[in-house]
Image: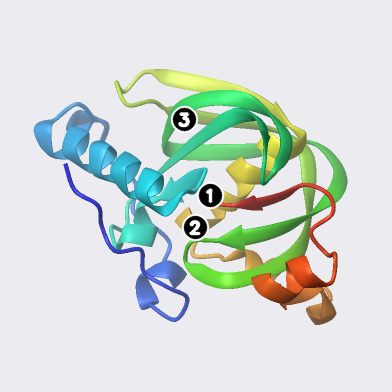
């Protein structure tokens, strides 16, 4: 369909709480086109997750797709394209772990963020079916990162120590990239 521009930090849409999606709209031509556009945009950007607000659509929709295997994120499990509509997240275990995160809306930077590593998300899928997913580790981090966009938050808001924010080139040059990281 179409690749959209990914808006960047500073754009007001990224700081708004996204609106709930009317379940009756799910499955409509417009909804399906939006999901396809989000997939095209995510693929063109080379990311693993995208929230509708990142393409200036302030709706509670996010997608995640982990190709699996070894790559720039280290060894990760494969997760097929998952569409989250009106998601509600619950922390199942507050034990947190840190990860160097990046974001398509904050290009060129990486920051170290600690997040709970065991969550559950209740949501509607692209067919308006109620779903629930439990996620741990890297997948839990990725999902939380994407769902933060729906609440008007960016990963940079969660960095506790500003010394743990770096440009990507220096991140690689000075060996900060050892260990898993995420870039939506």
Residue linked to disc 2: 149
Name the residue located 60 percent from the left edge and 24 percent from the top edge: 78
Element on which disc 1 rests: helix
Q: Earlier in the sequence, mark 3 or mark 1?
A: 3
Foreground residue, 24 or 62?
62
Which of the 4 quarters of the picture holds residue 90? top right
Between marks 1 and 2, how big is the CA–CA gap? 6 Å
Mark number, residue 176? none
Outermost left residue: 29
**Relative side of 99 to 123, left or right:** right
Q: Nearer the viewer, mark 3 or mark 1?
A: 1
**Relative side of 42 to 134, left or right:** left
Place of residue 140 in the rendered image (x, y in percent of width and height, measured from the top left): 69, 38
Element on which disc 3 rests: strand
**Marks 1 and 2 in Cβ contact (< 8 Å):** yes
Residue linked to disc 1: 146
Name the residue located 24 percent from the left edge and 44 percent from the top edge: 37
Place of residue 128 in the rendered image (x, y in percent of width and height, measured from the top left): 31, 23
């Amino acid at each position: 369909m179409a690749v959209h521009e990914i808006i960047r930090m500073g754009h007001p849409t990224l700081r708004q709480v996204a609106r709930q999606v009317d379940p009756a709209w799910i499955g409509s031509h417009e909804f399906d086109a939006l999901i396809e556009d989000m997939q095209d945009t995510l693929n063109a950007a080379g990311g693993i997750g995208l929230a509708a607000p990142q393409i200036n659509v302030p709706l509670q929709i996010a997608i995640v797709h982990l190709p699996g295997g070894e790559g720039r994120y280290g060894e990760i499990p494969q997760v097929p394209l998952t569409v989250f509509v009106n998601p509600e997240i619950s922390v199942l275990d507050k034990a947190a772990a840190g990860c160097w995160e990046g974001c398509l809306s904050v290009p060129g930077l990486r920051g170290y963020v600690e997040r709970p590593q065991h969550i559950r998300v209740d949501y509607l899928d692209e067919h308006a079916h109620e779903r629930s997913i439990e996620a741990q580790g890297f997948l839990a981090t990725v999902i939380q990162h994407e769902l933060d966009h729906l609440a008007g938050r960016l990963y940079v808001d969660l960095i506790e120590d500003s010394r743990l924010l770096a440009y990507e080139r220096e991140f690689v040059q000075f060996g900060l990239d050892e260990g898993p990281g995420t870039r939506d």
